[in-house]
Each structure stands twice: as C-alpha cells, then as structure tokens.
C-alpha cells in the first residue's frame, strides 16, 4: 500500500450513497483514500493534502479553482462521479496539464434523456392536475388542459449527450426538433435544426435546458429572454438551475397562467422552503433526482473507480471533459503509480 494517500475524496454526507461505494471500492483495490464529508475538514488539512494528492474526487459543484490546482504539484486528475463539472475550472486544469473526468456513463445520460421526456409529457398532459381532479372527486371538465406532444416544436438549449439522446427518442414522434449550440463540435443529425437562442425561445412549444453551467450560460435565461417564449410554452430544466433567472421565471409564471414549468435543478439546492417557486400552481418541481435510476447509480461507481485507477496508472480515464489536454497529460504522466 502507498505510504502517502494519492487519492482525496470530498463528498458531502448527503451524497454518501454515491461516494461511499467509490471510496470502498478504491480501498479494496489497495489504495489509501482520504475521505472528507465536510468541506471545513478538508480546508483544515488543505496545505498538507494538496502537497500529496494525485487524484481529487469531488462533487460537481465543489470549487476546484486554478489557485487550488496550483497548490497541488502532484495532481494529475480531478474526477466528478456525476455528469456535471461546473465547479471545476476546466480551462485552468487544461493549462496545468490536469485531466478532468466525469461520470458520463450511458446509463446516466440516457436516464436523464428519458426523464426529460417524462417531464415534457407530464407538463403537456397536466398529469398532476388530473391527479388532483381524481383525489378531490371532481367531475370531468368541459374543457381539458392536456395537449399532445406530436406536432409540437421542441427546442434544446445545448446538444450534448443528453440532448442527442432526447432527439433520438423523439425523432419518430412527429415533432420538429431544433437546438441552440454556440460551438458545434460534431455534426447535427439531419432531423435537428440549428437556430439562434432568440429564435428557439420564440418558436418552441417546449424548451429544454440541457446545457452545461459556465460563465456564458449562467443567467442566460433572464427576464428579457423568457418573455420571448410563447404564453403557453413548457420550460424544462434538467441541467443546472443557475442558467435561469429564477426571480424572472416566477414573474413570467405568475403573469402567464398557461405557461408550464418543470424544474429538476435550482440555483440553490436543496430548494429553500420559502422559495416562491414552491407556490406556483403551473410548476413541477423535483429535487435534482428525476434522472436518478437504479441503473444509472449502479454505473457511477465502477466508472469513477476506473477513471481514478486509470489516471494513477498513467492511462487515460474513460470519460474526459477536456480532451485538449490529452497530449500534454500523456507526456507528463507516463510512469504508473505504485501501490506497493
């Protein structure tokens, strides 16, 4: 076993169901892992830990800044068990020759795609409203609120793995698919149109926020842009809450009774009990967990363990966020990590 811990894990107790199996699996493989469930404990040991850490495992919103990485001369990889890496300064990591890996396992993004479509249908068909009708034993209304997905225009902000999986599933549903993506890395499917953000907001019946959180997307959907949307549009966010100005969204939802909202993620999590979002009758709210399935959670542990162990062996992790660093990283970390 290594005389110094090469792996440091920072995971809150609320996420123990993800981090405990990862830490346990690494320890079973002979690695010494320092495991912190409180940020303040990590901060207390920070100077000593940063001098020896080679791989840092952290939740996606943990602040892995350039300053922190500069203080870690042996750091070769930062690993998020989840898809998100919004707390990691990926540009700084690339400049320092540090690889950023995540949990972009198929089960993860496919679960998110399926749950995004679930929220579309639940919103359009007023699922919870109908449940309320039944529970209150109310008569069938003369005018029903439900609308079909077929024939609608679905706009996706961002076109990564989740959005591509959404588009693939809806391709045969008789919908028009469009996306706003600032930088197109891979060709779009022929059934998906690329449009500007303003056009997407004006013309989409359903708008799905599926982008990463970064300086260019933070607060992207402000009041001015939300006002571009159709009065009876559906807005779904299964990405990151800070992409939407929540105060502006509450205003729009109150002004437009036919507007529909489905949010799985919020600017502050857990969602405060006094958040005005909770009082909106036209909103579906879930606790950043709608895409958590037995299959996706089961796949996160082996993926994270593989990302960590491969990085320590001088091999590329399975899922890499900053591929531009690969040539420099490979030259720098060619000797395997010793565990004896």
Image (tube, rainbow, N blue to C red):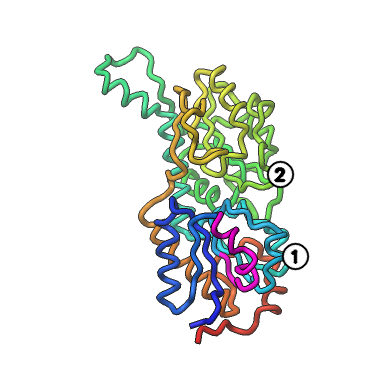
Q: Residues within 10 Å of mark 1 (few under 14, many from 20)?
A: few
Tell me if residue 98 comes above or below residue 126 in the rendering: below
Q: Residue at x 53, y 69 (%)?
A: 307
Q: Of 311 and 180, which appears nearest the observer? A: 311
Tell me if residue 205 comes above or below residue 2 in the rendering: above
Q: Position of residue 79 (x, y in %)?
A: 56, 63
Q: Which residue is mark 1?
A: 95
Q: Of 70 and 22, which appears nearest the observer? A: 70
On residue 181, the disc is none
Do we see residue 6 in this rendering?
yes
Q: Residue at x 71, y 44 (%)?
A: 216
Q: Which residues are magenta?
A: 40-56
Cα distance between the residues tagged 2 and 1:
20 Å
218 left or right of 40 in image? right
Tell me if residue 3 comes above or below residue 140 in the rendering: below
The residue furthest front is: 44
278 left or right of 90 in image? left
- Magenta highlight on residue 305: no
State which mark lies toward you, 2 or 1.
1
Mark 1 or mark 2, which is nearer the start of the sequence? 1
Do we see residue 104 in this rendering?
no
> What element does badge 2 sit on?
loop
């Amino acid at each position: 076993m290594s005389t110094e811990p090469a792996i440091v894990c920072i995971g809150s107790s609320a996420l123990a169901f993800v981090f405990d199996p990862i830490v346990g699996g690494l320890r079973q493989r002979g690695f010494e892992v320092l495991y912190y469930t409180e940020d303040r404990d990590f901060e207390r040991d920070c100077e000593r830990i940063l001098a020896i850490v080679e791989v840092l495992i952290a939740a996606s919103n943990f602040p892995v800044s350039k300053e922190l990485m500069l203080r870690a001369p042996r750091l070769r990889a930062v690993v998020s068990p989840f898809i998100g890496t919004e707390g990691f300064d990926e540009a700084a990591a690339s400049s320092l020759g540090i690889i950023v890996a995540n949990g972009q396992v198929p089960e993860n993004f496919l679960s998110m795609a399926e749950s995004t479509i679930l929220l579309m249908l639940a919103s359009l068909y007023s699922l919870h409203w109908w449940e309320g009708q039944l529970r209150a034993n109310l008569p069938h209304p003369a005018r029903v609120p439900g609308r079909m997905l077929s024939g609608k225009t679905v706009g996706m902000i961002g076109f990564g793995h989740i959005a591509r999986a959404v588009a693939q599933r809806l391709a045969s549903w008789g919908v028009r698919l469009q996306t706003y993506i600032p930088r197109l890395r891979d060709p779009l499917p022929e059934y998906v149109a690329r449009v500007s953000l303003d056009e997407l907001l004006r013309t989409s019946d359903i708008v799905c926020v599926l982008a990463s959180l970064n300086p260019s997307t933070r607060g992207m959907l402000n009041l001015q842009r939300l006002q571009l949307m159709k009065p009876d549009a559906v807005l779904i966010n299964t990405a990151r809450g800070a992409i939407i100005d929540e105060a502006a969204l509450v205003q729009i939802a109150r002004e437009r009774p036919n507007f529909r909202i489905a949010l799985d993620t919020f600017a502050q999590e857990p969602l405060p009990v006094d958040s005005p979002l909770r009082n909106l009758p036209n909103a579906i709210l879930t606790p950043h967990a709608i895409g958590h399935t037995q299959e996706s959670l089961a796949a996160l542990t082996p993926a994270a363990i593989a990302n960590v162990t491969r990085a320590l062996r001088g091999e590329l992790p399975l899922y890499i966020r900053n591929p531009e660093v690969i040539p420099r990283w490979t030259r720098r970390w060619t000797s395997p990590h010793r565990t004896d």
